[in-house]
Image (tube, rainbow, N blue to C red):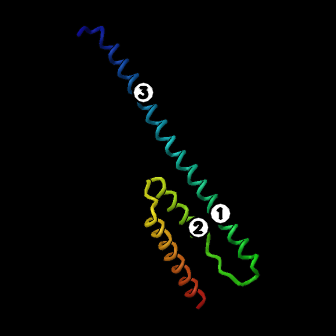
């Protein structure tokens, strides 16, 4: 190979590396932005569900227990992850409910301990 081709090859390789780095950066940024938007949507959904349940319970004019929004958020985050992975089945949905129930009991026990 002639020495005159070395700058051409080096320039081409440099341009190729620069273009590849740019494409990889865009893909990574898009994934991060998509995840952030999905998380924001899940948080909004959990908040709206919480508000709706609170309104419904206030309307019955009886004493009620309202659990922290973290339980709603946990439920919807697990639901979203299962849907994203294509693993939302009847069994998985039951597991999510059981996990939320376990967390609810944990919170209840902590409240009982704090009341002592």
| Circle 2 residue | 72
Quadrant assignment, res 72: bottom right
Relative height, residue 74 to residue 102 (above, below): above
Q: Could you tell me how far apart the alpha carbons at marks 2 and 3 are, in whole angstroms?
A: 45 Å
> Residue drawn at (68%, 81%), measured in percent from left and top?
64
Q: Which mark is residue 14?
A: none
Q: Secondary structure at mark 1?
A: helix
Q: Residue at x 30, y 13 (%)?
A: 6
Task: Assess disc 1: are there few (<14), some (14-19) or many (≥20) residues with their C-alpha within 10 Å of its C-alpha.
Answer: some
- Which of the two discs, 3 and 1, labels the residue nearer the N terminus? 3
Question: Quick one: quadrant of the C terminus?
Answer: bottom right
Q: Is residue 96 toward the left or the right of residue 65 in the image?
A: left
Task: In the rendered structure, find residue 18 and report the number of the disc placed on it.
Answer: 3
Calculate the distance from the C-alpha at mark 3 to the C-alpha at mark 1.
43 Å
The residue that appears at 46% across and 41% down in the rendered structure is: 28
The disc, 2 or 3, on the residue closer to the chain's N-terminal end is 3
Label 1 to label 2, Cα distance in Å? Answer: 8 Å
Tell me the residue that label 1 is attached to. Answer: 47
**Numbered disc in front, either 2 or 3:** 2
The residue sitting at the bottom extreme is: 116
Query: From what the image shows, is residue 13 above or below residue 54?
Result: above
């Amino acid at each position: 190979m002639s020495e005159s081709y070395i700058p051409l090859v080096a320039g081409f390789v440099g341009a190729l590396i620069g273009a590849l780095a740019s494409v990889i950066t865009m893909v990574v940024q898009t994934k991060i932005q998509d995840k952030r938007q999905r998380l924001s949507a899940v948080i909004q959904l959990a908040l709206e569900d919480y508000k709706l349940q609170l309104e419904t319970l206030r309307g019955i004019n009886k004493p009620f227990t309202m659990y922290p929004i973290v339980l709603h958020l946990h439920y919807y985050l697990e639901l979203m992850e299962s849907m994203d992975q294509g693993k939302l089945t009847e069994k998985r949905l039951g597991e999510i409910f059981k996990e939320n129930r376990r967390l609810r009991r944990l919170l209840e026990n902590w409240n009982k301990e704090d009341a002592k």
